[in-house]
Image (cartoon, rainbow, N blue to C red):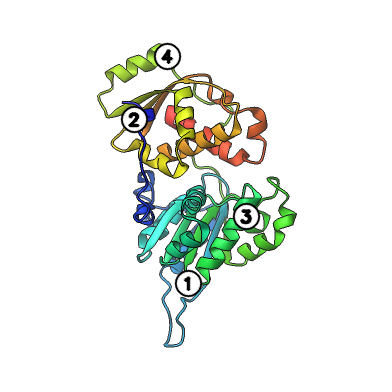
Amino acid sequence: MRLVDRHPEVDLPGLLQSFVPPPRFRGATFQSYRPDPRYPSQALAKERLRRWVHDRPRGLFRPRLPGPQGIYLDGGFGVGKTHLLVAAYLEAPAPKAFLTFEELTYALGLMGLREGARRFAGLRYLFIDEFELDDPGNAQMASHFLALTMERGLRVATTSNTPPGALGEGRFNAEQFRHQIQSLAKRFAVERIEGEDFRHRDPENLPNPLSDAALLEAHRQDQRPRSLDAFPELLAHLRTLHPIRYRYLFQGLQVVYLQGLEPIPDQNDALRFVHFVDQLYNLGLDLRASGVPLRALFPESYRHGAFAKKYGRALSRLAELLG
């Protein structure tokens, strides 16, 4: 079957219920998190986040939960931030939701800010992975959304590779939105997590895709539920779908085959493919591909521009999937 033949619809009333930790992190609990003893901040962040999740009101006149309303896990790649966020989600009382910041922006774009804030404010806990402000629109939307929901009592935990006060720097003229960024930062207690990337992946040594012949032979022999698409056709199909639908493209599949990877000259297409890779990776699916080397997918200017972290994450995940 082909992904380009799928046109999934979104169940808007059930959308919030679908926001749960991805299968790849099914075993991510506080018990399975192993802090590196060389970096005490890892164990400290684990204990503070666990305590935050289990906070309870004290006394008759304390309707709000004790402690900070928001927790912000700040740290580099591969130090266990997402693991801790999933662990907190698993122990938090319902109703709750877990999603990436990119998924949040897409969901709010689909619902509208006011309606989205109303729906999310009905939760007790919201867990947002990979919080980042790539453009002024995201800065304004995130600030307004958190104001509308957290003032109604929603407790929010998030992860990021950027300290909250530095969000947006190097991506747009953040000074124009300094007030929004500062008001957003004040809503969170920051837990800085030090450490090394546990994957120890060499960004300069990426695996090469297969040849077309090897890919088609692997597809022929593979007995698992699978798809096979030409890469240019896939990019064209992604343009026709709201990105919130990408997660539904993979229903019933175990492995995705892409034939003919090639450089992506349009940045909008490149960002759509990054989101596609994120969804495929988080769902724990396998990927097989042919075509150009991974480093040729995204132009050099993209990998050092405003969305550099997105492209770096996508290349790292593609390397893991194809390795």
Q: Which residue is mark 2?
A: 255
Q: Pointer 3: residues within 10 angstroms few (<14), some, or many (20+)?
A: many
**Of the pair 211 and 197, the residue shown nearer to us:** 211
For residue 222, which quarter of the picture? Answer: top left
Kind of residue sitting beneath label 2: Val
Q: In the figure, is residue 201 to the left or right of 212?
A: right
Q: Amino acid at mark 3?
A: Ala
- Label number found at residue 153: 1
Marks 1 & 2, CB-CB < 8 Å contact: no
Residue tagged 3: 139
Percent position (x, y) of residue 279?
43, 40
Q: In front: mark 1 or mark 2?
A: 1
| Residue 69 shows in this picture | no
Callout 4 secondary element: helix
Q: Are discs 1 and 3 less than 8 Å apart at CB?
A: no
Residue kind at label 1, given as amino acid type:
Gly
Badge 2 marks a residue whose secondary structure is strand
Crowding at dot 2, Cα within 10 Å, few <14 / some 14-19 / many 20+, comes out as: some
State the separation of the CA atoms marked 2 and 3. Answer: 36 Å
**Position of residue 68 measured from the top left corner of the image (x, y, whole percent):** 53, 71
Instruction: Report x, y in % for residue 255.
Output: 34, 30
Query: To which residue does mark 4 refer?
Result: 212
> Of marks 1 and 4, which one's residue comes earlier in the chain?
1
Marks 1 and 2, Cα distance to the nearest angstrom? 41 Å
Q: CA distance from mark 1 to mark 3?
A: 21 Å
For disc 1, the neighbor class at 10 Å (few under 14, some 14 to 19, many from 20) is some
Name the amino acid type tagged 4: Asp
Quadrant of the image occupied by residue 282: top left
